[in-house]
Amino acid sequence: MFDYMSVKETAKKWGLSERRVQILCSNNRIQGVIRINRMWLIPKTAEKPIDKRYIHKYEKDGVKE
């Protein structure tokens, strides 16, 4: 039953604002998220998605510049 976290817990864990986590949930950017009424439930095993608001530069071997 406790395999899920709230938006507040997720925001603290990932270092994001609660609003940003809500936006990620509503845009289906987090795998396995469930919405019950007005509450989002995020799996504890979910990984923080890459921030697509910024351009990330990578070299050919995948190492960040």
Image: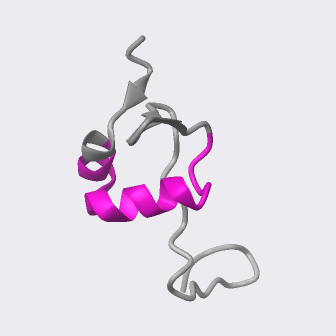
Please tell me whether residue 54 is drawn above or below residue 22 in the rendered image. below
Q: Residue furthest top?
A: 1
In-image side of 28 versus 10 (left or right): right
Please tell me whether residue 52 is drawn above or below residue 16 in the rendered image. below
Please tell me whether residue 32 is drawn above or below residue 22 in the rendered image. above
Residue at left 56%, top 49%? Answer: 30
The answer to whether residue 30 is magenta is yes
- Which residue is more in the foreground, 48 or 42? 42
Residue at left 45%, top 63%? Answer: 23
Q: Quadrant of residue 57?
A: bottom right
Q: Position of residue 39 (x, y in %)?
A: 38, 39
By secondary structure, the bulk of the magenta-drawn segment is best described as helix
Q: Position of residue 50 (x, y in %)?
A: 54, 66
Residue at left 43%, top 34%? Answer: 41
The stretch of residues the image draws in magenta is: 10-31
- Which residue is more in the foreground, 33 or 51? 33
